[in-house]
Amino acid sequence: MSATALPLRAFRHLRALKIGPQRAALTVFAIRVGAAGFAYGAQVLAARMMGWDAYGIFASVWVWTAMLGHTLTLGLSQGACRFVPGDQAQGDLDLARGYIRAGALVTGGAALAIAGLGAALLMLEPDLFAPAYWAPIAVALGVMPLFALQDYLEGVARSQNWVGLAIAPPYLLRQTLMMGCMIAAILLGAPPRAEVAMACMLIAAAGATGLQAALLAARLRRSLPAGPHRYRWRAWLGTSLPIAAIDLANAGFTFVDVIVLGALVSPAEVGVYFAATRIQQFVVFVHYAVSAATLQRYSAAQAQANRFLLAELVRRQGRMTAAATLVVGGAILAVSPLLLAMFGPGLGASVPILCILIAGSVGASLFGPGEDLLTMLGGERLCAGITVGSLVAAAGLCLALVPAFGTLGAAMAVALATMGRAALLARAAGRIHGLPTPVWATGMAR
């Protein structure tokens, strides 16, 4: 199809497409890589300061904190990228304002309720946890609501294509503050315990969340005129709750290997494996960056019934993600011995683990943005089912392979499940929306 055959609006969107998403993706990736550098430094400091046993305790508590905290938006963070741009594209600003307010209230209420339940459980049933975990868990209960609120703020900022405001506070500022707090704790002679590291994260999360909330509120007042609020609770929650299940399953999918290892091997082995996963996150950032730049554009294109733009977005996102994942993965493997050595001696055995994890990420990237299409355009329930099923498969594979292969078995389990999930999501997205997502697909959208 030639450019002259396109409607003027589609042509303008296509011209913006050539620069907008790529530039936004590069911005997000640069911020995430910078943040990962600070996060990596903080993890190295924590490991060096605490030793592998205490670091393993911190890693286990951190995994659960991140997994639950990022899920307590009840899917409303991702829902903001789906509903708010569509409402704005159709001129329904009352609904857009209503969603932003409702999402903040529900996210805050749900996060505080879960934190309160956790505190009650810790006090009433302390025998559920080993004594070494009590203090870190108590601090983590204060971190979870902040994570949830910041996740929601990120979703609202992404819905407006404000990628810098969306990504920099949670991933750059928070990690910078975390590292600064860790250094200050060391200089002040804090005891080398997991609760000290969690307290540093609490301070960092509070500062970054407060600043992001203030900046986002000021910017929304300028771009979204004041006016009435309308609410569609059933539609919003009916879509967002399955997305919440996807988020929870995704978080579980990210950390299932660490969780299973925590039950089967020593805290020191968990710490060593967790160090390798922190390096692998640099590769995962590629998909996150491209998705953050493109996700909300699917919703706007769908609202405008622009199928050509949708197909072009899918094609560009898939190819960009796969190529960048391969390049970044190769670069990380090349410098992995140096990165692992920063944690301490004796981590050379983690290089094969890292190779397997990166191979899983590269293989999954070849299947394209199936999950993004299902969550933005419809099919979130099927996406949730596939993700939960893949999580169960990953856990089963970990339980089967870890006793025989140790930490290497956990990496193999996650890599296999990651690629299988990506293939199933690509097939589901193609069947429901008629948009082929794998990088080798050449057919146009139906």
Image (cartoon, helix red, strand yellow):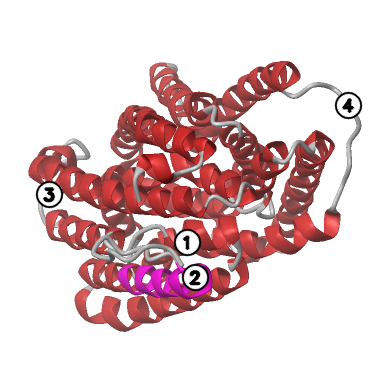
Kind of element beneath mark 1: helix
Q: Amino acid at mark 1?
A: Glu
* Image point (32%, 66%), residue name: 443
Compared across the picture, whether 24 is left or right of 411 comes to right
Kind of element beneath mark 2: helix
Q: How many marks?
A: 4
Q: Answer with mark 2 or mark 1, whichever residue precedes in sequence.
A: 1
Which residue has dot 4 on it? 227
Which residue has dot 1 on it? 371
- Is residue 251 something one can see in this rendering? no
Compared across the picture, whether 50 is left or right of 102 comes to left
Q: Answer with mark 3 or mark 1, whichever residue precedes in sequence.
A: 3
**Residue 387 image label:** 2
Q: Quadrant of residue 220?
A: top right
Check contact, mark 2 vs mark 3: CB within 8 A. no
Magenta part of the chain:
419-434
Compared across the picture, whether 41 is left or right of 383 comes to left
Camera-side residue: 60 or 434?
434
Q: Answer with mark 3 or mark 4, whichever residue precedes in sequence.
A: 4
- From the image, state whether disc 2 or disc 1 is nearer to you: 1
Query: How far across and how far down the image is residue 344, in percent?
Result: 18, 40
Which residue has dot 3 on it? 346
Mark 4 residue crowding within 10 angstroms, few (<14) / some (14–19) / many (20+): few
The CA span between labels 2 and 1 is 9 Å
Kind of element beneath mark 3: loop
* Image point (38%, 61%), residue name: 258
